[in-house]
Image: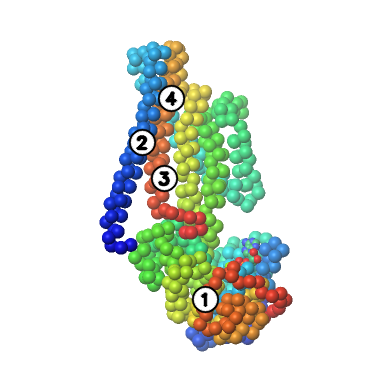
Amino acid sequence: MTSLAGPVNQVLGEQILAGERSRSRRWRVQFMLAWLVIVAALVAFVLITINLDTQFIAKWLPFILTGVPVTIFVSFASITLAVILAVLGALGRLSVNPYVNGLASFYVSFFRGTPLLLQIVFIYFALPQMGLVLPEIPTGIIALGFNYGAYMTEVFRSGIQAVPHGQTEAALSLGMSGGTTFRRIIVPQAFRIVTPAIGNDFIAMLKDSSLVSVISVHELLYQAQVAGRPNHKSMQTLLIAAMVYWILTIAFSFFQARLERRQAVGDRSRRPGSG
Amino acid sequence: MNGQGIVHEIHPVELPGPLVPAGAEPIVRATKIEKYFGRNHVLRGCSMTVYPRETITILGRSGSGKSTFLRCLNFLEEPSAGRVEIDDTAVEARPLGDRPRAERERIRKLRTDAGMVFQEFNLFPHLSVIGNLVEAPVHVKHVARPAATELAESYLEKVGLIDKRNEYPSRLSGGQRQRVAIARALTMEPKVLLFDEPTSALDPSLVGEVLKVMESLAHEGRTMIVVTHEMQFAREAADRIYYMHEGQFVEIGPHTQVIDDPQDPRTREFLARFLGPSRSRQAAATPQDEAVAPPPAVGPGPV
Ligand SMILES: Nc1ncnc2c1ncn2[C@@H]1O[C@H](COP(=O)(O)OP(=O)(O)O)[C@@H](O)[C@H]1O
Ligand SMILES: [Mg+2]
């Protein structure tokens, strides 16, 4: 490069950059326009085909919204239980002890092999025959937690296995015990690997928590049905519930993206084995 | 039971090097190490004696068992037979059955006494440079964090990376990563350092900075066992060179013998490929393993 080429190249570079920026801005505007058109069309369709009955909505909306904290509470409690079970399950599935491994493998197989809805009603309606009576909310949390825990067991196991073996060797060669190596070296790296999966599972959980409406947990979907059915306004109440679920998932997706960006700092451009 | 069955014999050429204090006992005794991978007999009775402050180099072509031997020394690989003793901690091979708790603790002691530097660095990506260094002192030796940090900083200084203290490994070059890995091993203040081809994964332009650190460690009297293809390093730093061929040390001696005047035909063949037929002293080239053709079929024989 001669010294003369410098400024000229810089001007050209700026122009290319400006072009790229304006193209991507235009693309984003068009993208949002597409959404706007679809939403407007849907709203128009609803307004034309049904009587929206704003008075009814004003009266029942607060009632429906009382389901939101319940939904969020059940989801958080269930994902917490699921993570704990998944950690134990993953440890079990990685254990050399055949009994421990067998138990974990049975757990995963059973809870993934049967429907979640069946698990919910089983705990609520069948277990009382054995004298085990649980209230609605704990039933929902246990069913959701065990079911998601089974799926997440496999996710956690593969996350742990995805940490390069060289990490274990380096830790052991420094004199760390197996336990210290696992806690201090493997788990923090595995956790980063599985964070996106936990986030996705949480969002799925927000929606699947609606299944516990069948055992009368007063969560979002249940409240919407209670408000809608006797008044023959299910269209209104269910649409409201749908909107609220949707907003919740968008909000949590946003938090999830932020968390992942934060975690990415510190091990950017990480390649396996290159640490 | 510190391995009564197996008697360590010092090979006649395993004489203490010039830096070894008079009358010093060996600090590493590896005795008749055998290793099978399935039916593959990879190590065939390898013994080694290392005195304090000595630097040992292991040469040999790819697949001859150098890494396996080094990894048997700190039980990253379980030997099929034999015994390892490092600074009065002795562990015998126990290929069948579990080890009792006391013996597992001895292996951990042995590992804290033997720092290891890997070809692939294996730094902890979720910890900063200083975090990598203090992790083991704090969680293994239970050194207080401020004291461990101070120690770690002194070793970062030594490898010339104190300014990268708070950087994450992914932001460092290969040469810098390997120097951090060396400092991490040093921060545990081991009795002996094990290097497994520490420069083989590096861009050629970055090899020098790592070798410089290793040479300074050798000259200040660190006990080191180094698997390498860097002939220049072997020549300048090694008190003794062990040439490994198909799982056996077929030639042991100072560089003036093993590199400049090899006695064993297999060593000669290896060096001929490596340094060119003339085996000139100036030739310090370091071709990759793959460039080394298999040696002629010579039956294995003990040293
Ligand atoms: N974990 C393993 N499982 C099976 N075979 C192995 C394993 N590690 C090494 N080997 C075999 O042992 C032999 C020696 O390998 P290695 O010690 O890595 O040689 P070097 O370090 O001299 O290149 C090779 O034949 C290799 O294929
Ligand atoms: Mg090797």
Q: Which residue is mark 3?
A: A260
From the image, tell me which residue sits under label 1: B285
Task: Determine if residue B135 is in view.
Answer: yes
Numbered disc 3: secondary structure? helix
* Chain under disc 2: A
On what subunit does the disc labeled 4 rest? A
Residue sitting at x 36%, y 13%: A53
- Taking the image as four quarters, which one is ligand 1 found in? bottom right
Gap between marks 2 and 4, in whole Å? 26 Å
> In the rendered image of this protein, does residue A182 appear above or below residue A27?
below
Please say if B211 is above or below B137. below
The residue wearing badge 4 is A242
| Label 2 sits on residue | A28
Amino acid on which the number 2 mark rests in the picture? Arg
In which quadrant will I find the C terminus of chain B? bottom right
Residue at point 55%, 77% (across, down): B57
Looking at the picture, tell me which residue is in the foreground, A109 or B138.
A109
Quadrant of res A123: top right
Circle nearer the N terminus (2, 3): 2
Q: Could you tell me how far apart the alpha carbons at marks 3 and 1 are, in whole angstroms?
A: 46 Å
Residue B92 visible, this orientation: no
Among the 4 quarters of the image, the one containing residue B206: bottom left
